[in-house]
Structure formats: C-alpha cells, structure tokens
Image (tube, rainbow, N blue to C red):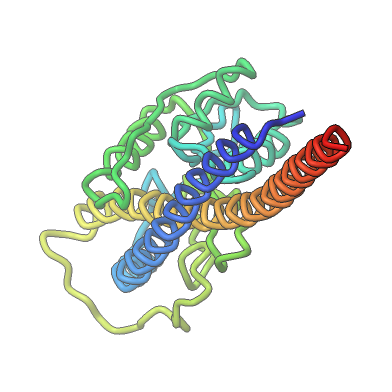
C-alpha cells in the first residue's frame, strides 16, 4: 500500500506533467493560427499562377503541351510525396497519414517509391521496407517558400528525367481545430481540367480570362519558369496545411492529457485524504487506548 509520502510525490509529479501538457497545448494553438495565416497569404499568388498557366497552356496556336503538363501513355513508376511530422505527441496524426497512404497504393501494379517529408513518416516507411528515393526532415516551423522549394524542384527534375511517370502528393488537409483529413492527389503531370487549383475550393475563379496578354521574353520561357514554381508552391502549401493539422492534433492530444492528469490528481488526492484520515483515526484510537490503560492501572 502506498504511503502518504509516495502519494504526495506522485501528485507532485502529475502536476508537473500537466503544466508541460498545458504549455504545449497553448504553443500548438498559436502555431496553428500562424500556419493558416501563411496558407491564406499564399492563396493569391497560387490563384494568379494558375490563371497564367491555364491561359498559356490553352492557347489554340500551341502545338505541344509542356512536358510537365503532358500525361504519359504508359505509367510504370509512381512517386509518392508523403508529408508527416518530425515530432510525436500529436495523437494519431502521423499514423493516419502513413496508414492511408500505404493502403491507397498497396494494390497498384506500378513500382512505387516514396519521398517522405518528416522524420516520423520516414521511420514508419523504413520499418515497412518501402523504397525511399529521397527524404526531407527538420524543416523550420513555419517554413518559408525558400526552405521547401528544393523539394518541388527535385520532383520536377525527377519527372523530367523520366525516373518516374506520375507523382502523387499525400498530406493532411486542415479543416478545423477538431477535424483534419488525409488528402491524396495528383501532383505531376499537372492536369488542366480544372478552373481552379487542386484542393483550393475557396478560390473565387470562374473562367480564365480571354484578354490578350503579351509575355516576355516568350510563352515557352514563361511556362518553363512558372510550372516548376507552381509545383513547388503546391508542396509548400501542403506542408503548411500539414503543419497546421499536426499542431491541431497535438493541441487536442495535450488537452486530453491535461484533463486526464486532472482526473489522476483528483483520484490520488482522494486516496491521500483517505490515508491521512485513517492515520489520524489510528493515532486517536492509540492515544485513547493508552489513556484508558493508564486509567485502569491507576486503580
């Protein structure tokens, strides 16, 4: 049976843990807002880049599509960019994105390689024996576009060199503090069937402009520059959304941990009070018995 000293030590330890979880919850809430502000600030640039891309690629005088816009007739090799986190304590966040990604590509006939972004996802893929083409970890929180643009440019080079025939992007879309969902979508080649960028339903794009534009130095040079940057921007926004989802999941996990710590403290405090009450009662009984014994000896 625990002594009162042991119970006091356990109560003190749980209180210290609850202070840490409460602090992590506060920090995560701030980081969610920070990441989502960056996503919203990048929307106008993505919208404008998509409009220019559609206008250039759909011009009737163009004879050939850009290589990054051309769907290959035979797909033999697939590359999957999977975004997870570098840290734990985020509930089922990392497990969900890895599990759904592996389930999605489990039965495909093509050869599948992975580019994990985040240490947790990388470690899970390695434990399952998956082929990893490249990996990125320890990104800043939140990252700048320059911090992640190398990922997008690596994907573009890999696709143009013919090492893979199709690239998918797997990440966690932030919807609210209590709801996030895993998204698996095409990244390369860029599909021009939409009037708005993929996964950007909030954009107010109706129709591409029919106005006459003059591009310097020429249209092909602009396409060569804008398409890789557009891919890098898609990866950048996916990482921001994933980081927001990670912090939201961590905030929820830390909130649950804080509440559980409070319940444990209440239970331990109750046990401590019962033990103290029993100790005091035993002492009173012992004193009363001793006094009664002395009284009997006197007579």
Q: Is residue 271 above or below residue 77?
A: below
Q: Is residue 89 left or right of residue 217?
A: right
Question: Residue 172 at x, y = what percent?
Answer: 55, 52
Which residue shows up at 85% across the image and 35% down it? 293
* Mark count: 0
Residue 85 vertical placement versus 44 (above, below): above
Residue toward you, 275 or 95: 275
The reply to whether residue 168 is in sight is: no
Q: Which residue appears at 22% of the width and 60% of the height? A: 219
**Residue 260 drawn at (x, y percent):** 66, 51
- Residue 239 drawn at (x, y percent): 41, 50
In this picture, is 74 found above or below 147? above
Asked if residue 277 lies left or right of residue 218, the reply is: right
Indicate left or right for 6 with 117 as reference: right
Going 45% across and 47% down the picture, which residue do you hit?
A: 20
Residue that sits furthest to the left in the current view: 217
Image quarter for residue 90? top right
Q: Which quadrant, please, contains the N terminus? A: top right
Query: Which corner quadrant holds the C terminus?
Result: top right
Position in image of residue 211 (x %, y %): 29, 84
Foreground pick, 280 / 161? 280
The reply to whether residue 76 is visible in this rendering is: yes
């Amino acid at each position: 049976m625990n002594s009162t000293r042991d119970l006091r030590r356990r109560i003190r330890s749980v209180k210290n843990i609850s202070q840490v979880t409460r602090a992590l919850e506060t920090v995560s809430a701030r980081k969610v807002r920070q990441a989502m502000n960056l996503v919203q600030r990048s929307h106008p640039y993505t919208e404008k880049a998509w409009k220019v891309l559609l206008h250039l690629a759909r011009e009737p005088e163009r004879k050939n599509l850009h290589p990054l816009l051309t769907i290959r007739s035979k797909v033999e090799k697939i590359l999957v960019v999977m975004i997870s986190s570098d840290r734990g304590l985020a509930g089922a966040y990392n497990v969900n994105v890895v599990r759904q990604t592996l389930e999605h590509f489990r039965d495909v006939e093509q050869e599948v390689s992975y580019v994990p972004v985040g240490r947790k996802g990388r470690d899970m893929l390695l434990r399952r024996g998956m082929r990893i083409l490249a990996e990125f970890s320890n990104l800043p929180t939140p990252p700048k576009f320059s911090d992640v643009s190398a990922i997008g440019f690596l994907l573009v080079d890999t696709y143009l060199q013919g090492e893979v025939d199709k690239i998918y992007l797997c990440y966690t879309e932030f919807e609210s503090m209590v709801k996030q969902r895993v998204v698996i979508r095409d990244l390369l080649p860029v599909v021009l069937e939409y009037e708005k960028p993929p996964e950007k339903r909030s954009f107010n794009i109706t129709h591409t402009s029919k106005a006459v534009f003059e591009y310097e130095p020429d249209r092909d040079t602009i396409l060569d520059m804008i398409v890789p940057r557009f891919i890098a921007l898609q990866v950048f926004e996916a990482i921001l959304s994933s980081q927001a989802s990670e912090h939201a999941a961590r905030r929820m996990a830390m909130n649950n941990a804080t509440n559980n710590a409070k319940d444990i403290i209440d239970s331990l405090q109750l046990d401590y009070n019962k033990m103290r009450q029993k100790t005091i009662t035993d002492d009173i009984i012992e004193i009363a018995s001793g006094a009664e014994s002395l009284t009997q000896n006197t007579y």
